[in-house]
Image (tube, grey):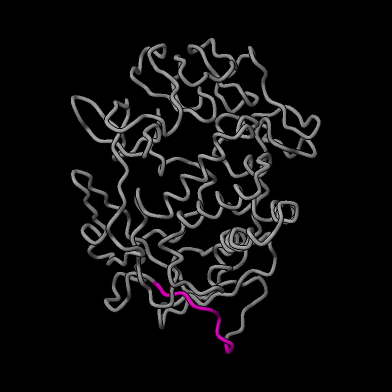
Amino acid sequence: MAAPLIAFALLILPQAVFSYRYDIEENKASAPSCPSYACKKSSQTFEQSQCAYYDESDYTYYVNPCAQSTESCMLKGENPGNHTCQTAQTKLSWPGEKCTQTGDCNPIYSTACTNGICVGLSSGVACTDSNYCNPGLSCQGTPGSMKCAPLIQAGSKGCRADFDCVPYAGCNITSTTDSSENACVQYWSIKNDEFVAICGEHQSNLCKYNLCRERDGGFKCYEKFENTHIIPWPCDLNAKATDCNFTHHEFNFLPDCVCGLNPTGAAYCSLIPGDGPVIEYEAALKSWLFSTSSSQCNTLRRFESQCILDFWGNTKGIYALMYWYLYMSYYPQIQDTQDCVLKTFYPSYVSYKELYKKYDDQDDGAAMLELVFFTYILAIFN
């Protein structure tokens, strides 16, 4: 099924710890919908490893970035008091991803680390799902006789889901009972006013502009449009049913109203298709999926930052993809946010922003050396 682009687990999704409506205490009528965030005052004393203190007298989190690059600040619910830095868990590798020892590999899916690569199942070997298969393969067949088999080329039929197709293609599902009717189609290739099988919330990443609508007894791809609203788009959590509503012809988008991490407790609308950062992200994602490097990932890991960082040799492309993904994902939270708050909660965003912005001032060799230096630190946060 070709899922909507924004809904994809395209990279390791940032932890949405700030996307909820914030009610300090329901019985306090004066409590704001969103807390405020500010740098630690010079008069405040933090304990070792403390990264945030919530002061219920002014509904503000006072923060201080974690000292270690391998740590991040985790808020413990909505309670007042101290919050501490937590060491991020080391991420395990899937079949096809890099390793130095067998313990680096996910023991559920990989049998060993051989020549620096986690080993999975080969073509023709029985499987239960595609996580077990080596890159270039997916788990195909009928229940009880599933085997790892080569990914289906764009233009060929037989897919049940996107991950049965080569990395730059998705499954245009016309039948849920007979996969021989379903064809693998290149992402962003179906032209305006042509039929697409699945259209979720006006989106299909098989359509050229990622937009679709109901037409002529089915779904058809729609032309590109640019949003007329100005971003960032402030909103009121108490009226979010109308505050973030955006209509373009018969399209009606209702993005979330999300608390920002700013000094005033302001909330902002999430981004929607056609917004500038989303367009930039889609362009960067296309560069990765259509590169030869994407074929080195397990098919279910084609959108995961860990595999992208392992294999994509396009330094500028990595910086662009990671920066625009994080910027797009955190967009409501980072508006008018102080640097100390960004460094406390979104250290990977801060680092990739710096790398992306200064890339043009470096040659490719220097940029690659810097990328290697940051890869280990940043990968654990994305």
Q: At which x and y percent is residue 270? A: 36, 57
Magenta-span inclusion, residue 217: no
Q: Which residues are magenta?
A: 35-43
Picture layout, residue 47 above or below residue 6: below
Picture layout, residue 260 above or below residue 143: below
Q: Image quadrant of residue 257?
A: bottom left
Q: Image quadrant of residue 373?
A: bottom right
Residue situated in front as seen by the camera: 346 or 157: 157
Q: Residue at x 19, y 24 (%)?
A: 217
Which corner quadrant holds the N terminus?
top left
Q: At which x and y percent is residue 316? A: 62, 50
Residue situated in front as seen by the camera: 126 or 379: 379
Give left or right: position of 379 versus 341.
right
Give left or right: position of 75 versus 311.
left
Q: Residue at x 55, y 40 (%)?
A: 287
Q: At which x and y percent is residue 4? A: 38, 38
Picture layout, residue 46 above or below residue 15: below
Residue situated in front as seen by the camera: 10 or 196: 196
Q: At which x and y percent is residue 326? A: 51, 55
Magenta-span inclusion, residue 41: yes
Q: Residue at x 48, y 28 (%)?
A: 169
